[in-house]
Image: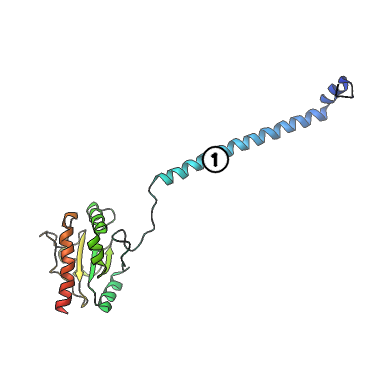
Amino acid sequence: MIFEKPPSLILLLCQHPAHTQGAAMEKSYVSVFLLLVAISCVLAKDVGKKDTKETNTKPKLPQTLSRGWGDQLIWTQTYEEALFRAKNSNKPLMIIHHLDDCPHSQALKKVFAEHKEIQKLAEKFILLNLVYETTDKNLAPDGQYVPRILFIDPSLTVRADITGRYSNRLYAYEPSDISLLYSNMQKALKLLKTEL
């Protein structure tokens, strides 16, 4: 036998009050420890669920001045800055009025951003897209609607003669009008060269 003490003494030690209190405390510590582990596991699962919900949705990209109309293009921040840059650079200004929650604006934006020739030609303009109306009434010659695209030459004259195809919304463009918009952009550049 391994024990040198008689078995009766071991039984007496196991039943000693100090030994049973220590065992009870040890059991309570183990119980508390297991409870904390269980709570930690539950909380870790909840955090994991929140993380997967956020990663399942499309990540929101930081807002840029392009607002999705052409991220590689240089856009101005305000109407006043755009006018200043148009006058000083001798480039025409193209202003796009739109709304983020307008399906017509979103459809035109998608076609505009994906059209390689328009993106290339747009580099020759001072660009501004507005999701709000300006105080300049010349930018709404036939009313305030979206999407609406107007051109302003470096002399700060609104080119009311460069219009879309709709008689009730002269400066509106639909996605199917992208070739007309492209030719109007070319027209704004040609007029700039011949008139100035």
Q: Is residue 195 above or below residue 169?
A: below
**Rendered location of residue 139, percent (x, y):** 20, 68
**Quadrant housing residue 177:** bottom left
Q: Amino acid at mark 1?
A: Leu
User: Which residue in the protein does label 1 denote?
Assistant: 43
Residue drawn at (39%, 58%) of the image: 62
Q: Is residue 3 left or right of residue 195?
A: right
**Rendered location of residue 17, percent (x, y):** 82, 27
Residue drawn at (58%, 39%) of the image: 40
Under circle 1, the secondary element is helix
Q: Is residue 111 above or below residue 186?
A: above
Q: Is residue 42 above or below residue 64?
A: above
Q: Quadrant of the N terminus?
A: top right
Q: Is residue 153 left or right of residue 32?
A: left
Neighbour tally class for label 1: few under 14, some 14-19, many 20 plus, Cα within 10 Å = few
Residue 112 seen in this snapshot: yes
